[in-house]
Amino acid sequence: MILQINEEHPQPRRIDRICETLSSGGLVAYPTDTVYGIGCDIYNKQAVEQLQRLVKEIKGEAETSPLSFICQDLSNIAEYAYVGDHAYRTLRRMLPGPYTFVLEATKLVPTVMRNKRKTVGIRVPDHPIPHAIVDRLGNPVANTSATDRDGELIPDPWTIDDLYGHAVDLIVDGGYVFPEPSTVIDFSQDYPQLLRQGKGEIGDLEYVELI
């Protein structure tokens, strides 16, 4: 089902409906500042496992493929990831924005969400809809990018409905986006490493290793 919403000023009742779907274990597709994402409540084990199965279906990746978190703000991030001084200065300057930061996970990260490296990818999109969702839900949303089976990012809710309407409980119509992946920076090592150059500019970020 597609739910239309004001992308600049999301209606509270429609955000409530989205969060009710997430709280009941549903999967929801929604726009961000980079791509359309598909997500679920990180504390619903069955929903996370369902999202991991969908990742395998869409991308042909293992069901244990890491999912990113959409968080509300920097203080919310600190509950789920260890943020060192250098990382804190960087995140404070760059977020919200089109970045994914890989950080060491805290014990609050559910077991089903942990990978072998015990790290987590954190996002704080600069977009009113996901911000309103995590604010109302009260905890982060597990997230994966919506792509077709050729790996192309999906720019609109109607294509998501055509391809994955069987697996997604609610699709939030935030309009057409011009999809571009987030820039991924790993802060879990001694020095930050650029894992993927995407929409977010690196600028004057110190000591970034290009790999």
Image (tube, grey):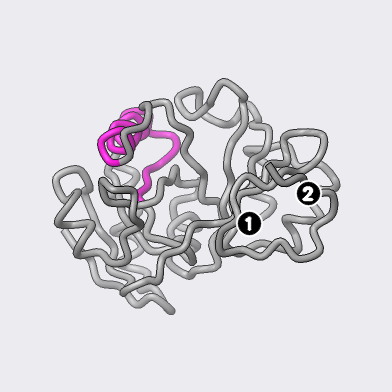
Foreground residue among 106 and 98: 98
Residue visible at 44% across and 31% down in the picture: 65
Question: Which amino acid type is marked by label 1?
Answer: Asp
Q: Residue at x 40, y 50 (%)?
A: 145
Which-is-in-front pick, marks 2 and 1? 2
Residue 186: x and y in percent read 68, 42
Q: Residue at 30%, 73% (x, y): give it.
A: 5
Quarter of the image holding residue 154? bottom left
Q: Secondary structure at mark 2?
A: loop
Chain-order first, disc 2 or disc 1: 1
Tag 2: Cα neighbours inside 10 Å, few (<14), some, or many (≥20)? some
Q: Which residue is mark 1?
A: 73
x and y percentages locating residue 174 in the rendered image: 33, 71
Query: Which SS class for mark 1?
Result: loop
Q: Is residue 132 visible?
A: no
Q: Which residue is mark 2?
A: 208
Position of the C terminus by quadrant: top right
Residue type, numbered disc 2: Val
| Start-end of magenta stretch | 38-58
Tell me whether the residue at label 2 lies in contact with that at label 1, contact meaning CB atoms closer than 8 angstroms.
no
> Is residue 51 shown above or below 158?
above
In three-dimensional space, the C-alpha distance between marks 2 and 1, rounded to whole angstroms, equals 23 Å
Across and down, in percent, residue 58 comes to 28, 41
Q: Quadrant of the N terminus?
A: bottom left
x and y percent of residue 143 in the render?
Answer: 43, 46
Query: Along the horizontal axis of the image, is 189 left or right of 195?
Result: right
User: Would you call the spot at circle 1 few (<14 residues within 10 Å), some (14-19), or many (20 or more)?
Assistant: some
User: In the picture provided, is 76 more to the left or to the right than 50?
Assistant: right
